[in-house]
Image: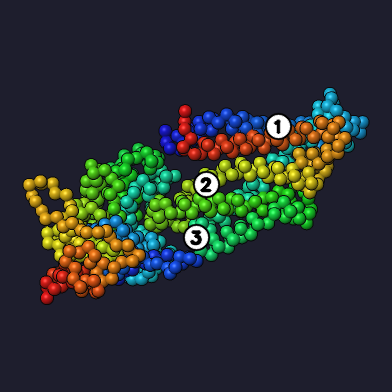
Amino acid sequence: MNKRQLEMRNFVRRFCKNRLAVIGLFCFTLIALLVIVLPPLMPYTEAEIDIIAFNAPPGSSHILGTDTVGRDVLTRLLYGGRVSLFVGIVSTMISVLIGIPLGLLSAFYRGWIENIVMRLADIFMTIPSTILILFLVSMFGPSIVTVTVVIGVLGWTKFARQIYGSVLTVREKDYVEAGVAIGQKDRLIIWRYVLPNAIAPIFISVTFRIASAIILESSLSFLGMGVQAPAASWGNMLYNAQSISILKNCMWMWLPPGLTLMTTILSINFIGNGLRDALDPKTALE
Amino acid sequence: MSKDLLQVKNVKKYYVSKKGFLSGPPKTVKAVDGVSFTLKEGEIFGIVGESGCGKSTLGRCILRLTELTSGEIWFDGVDIARLSREEMRQKRQEMQVIFQDPGASLNPRMTIGELIREPLDIFMDRLTEGEKTARVEELMQMVGIDISYTSRFPHEFSGGQRQRIGIARALAAKPRLLICDEPVSALDVSVRAQVLNLMAELKQQFGLTYIFISHDLSVVHHICGRVAVMYLGRIVELAEKDILYRSPCHPYTKALLSAIPQPDPERKRERVILQGDVPNPAAPPPGCHFHLRCPYASERCRQEIPELRETEKGHWTACHLTEGVKE
């Protein structure tokens, strides 16, 4: 068995030792599958209004009831899940795509690029992000795309700093010098020598970032600055359920999105913890 | 007489500590302080000295793995100290390196096959895929690694095997000069001889030139032709190994040689025991760097730095005493 297979097997074993991580992975996969597969199969669309059933409690025609304007809660929950997962995953991808190359290059080359990029990161980190996001979203108009892009672009600093740190360690390794000595081009030294040896910790932060981006999108929607009705998101479903009477009497409107949001975030965080343990070779097998 | 392959002229490498807010004036460590020597094609040139004397830094300077502070390095008629990064990269085909720690110098994420093939991809790209594979297998056989191990990773091999892989990789692009930085220091004594013999064989086979950096005098004696002894960034003595080992001139060389373990307990030998430690390289003593520990130090040694002079044909020493003897 070669190293990659062996590493993979040990990785899976370590991951599986963490029960919560396995449960998290299971829940997350289940939610993702339901959210992707089910919406087209639902009898309603997310904006469809059932004029004879406003505020209808869960029943035979609306499994989770309807909201204040008569839209099916289950359908909206599923469509909202699509939005939440999309925002979480895509904005994280944007952050990674901006942060990783910048952090990598500034750590590898040092010098002026390091100064510019890392000072820029410092500046970005001093700005209270929620306020900036609110401002930007209101400037460009709230929509799924704006929210995703703004969350993604503003989130690059975390990844840039993290990869910067680990590349600073890796670039001093003997094998990187050996690559230079063998006559390899910088581009391939970065690609073959530095990146593969520095990337592991990023996987963990990616999972946590997806979770926090989902929360951020929900908070934005809850503040009315996120995804706009009639499109659904978990955040704006909660936003629509703000009044005391709904909170008191129509639990089906806020409990399902609240619970799914919580389950998703917990699952992703558990997966992240499991990844961290699995990537650390010091975690014992048996 | 074969021609000169490498000429190192007055190479200096100073490390300057960054000036901090409260740390006072910056300190300069003269890791390599004016080293010159000439290397003939096909020679094995040894550089010995205790740790911290600058021998590895010198090797890295010659390879331009670190930028020199000043000096010239003429390799085959070109001053490589003045080449641009890209020109230097091209030149690396002709000068390769074998590192001290074979465990740390092979990329853990690449297979043995990929590692040995890499120099071919860089410098011999006109070869077809098949020819490259054949060359990789040839190299593996040459250093005695089974070709069925191509897709394994470095950590699956022993220290000796890894060093062989390092050698195969260094030889892949057919270099002329090989700088070996303590190539056997990290190896078991039992494996050491194998690797040394392999290196000697390969030298014969391909007409290689070696610079062999080591702190181990017996290893250097085993493999080298000429030997330079370094102390605190300077060459203190340079001669053919037989002359150097039989009749060393510099007191430091004498002390070093007397420290080689003697296998024959009957043969008694005068042991020169040095007093004190190597001085702090950031603040070396004035005059001859060695005078604090030298049993023969005179007033002149405390003030004047001795030049490296040819005391006999091909025997260079940097010591005021030998000069006196000669005159």
Q: Earlier in the sequence, mark 2 or mark 3?
A: 3
Residue B308 position in % (x across, y down): 22, 70
- Identity, as a three-letter code, of the amino acid under mark 2: Ile
Residue B57 position in % (x across, y down): 33, 61
Q: Secondary structure at mark 1?
A: helix
The residue positioned 34% from the left and 47% from the top of the image is: B102
The quadrant holding residue B227 is bottom left
Q: Quadrant of the N terminus of chain A?
A: top left
The residue positioned 62% from the left and 42% from the top of the image is: A208
Query: Is any atom of residue A191 visible in this view?
Result: no
Q: Nearer the viewer, residue A223 or B313?
A: A223
The quadrant holding residue B289 is bottom left
The residue identified by callout 1 is A34
- Identity, as a three-letter code, of the amino acid under mark 1: Leu
Q: Residues within 10 Å of mark 3 (few under 14, many from 20)?
A: few
Chain identifier of the residue bearing label 3 in the image: A
Q: Secondary structure at mark 2?
A: loop
How far apart marks 3 and 1 lie (CA) works out to 46 Å
How far apart marks 2 and 3 lie (CA) works out to 17 Å
Chain identifier of the residue bearing label 2 in the image: A
The residue identified by callout 2 is A199
Q: Nearer the viewer, residue B129 or A111?
A: A111
Q: Earlier in the sequence, mark 2 or mark 1?
A: 1
Mark 3–mark 1 contact, CB under 8 Å? no
* Numbered marks: total: 3
Residue A109: assigned label: 3
Q: Earlier in the sequence, mark 3 or mark 1?
A: 1
The residue positioned 80% from the left and 34% from the top of the image is: A254
- Identity, as a three-letter code, of the amino acid under mark 3: Tyr
> Viewed as shown, does residue A83 lie left or right of B29?
right
Instruction: Single out the mark in the foreground, 3 or 1.
Output: 3
Residue positioned most to the right: A52
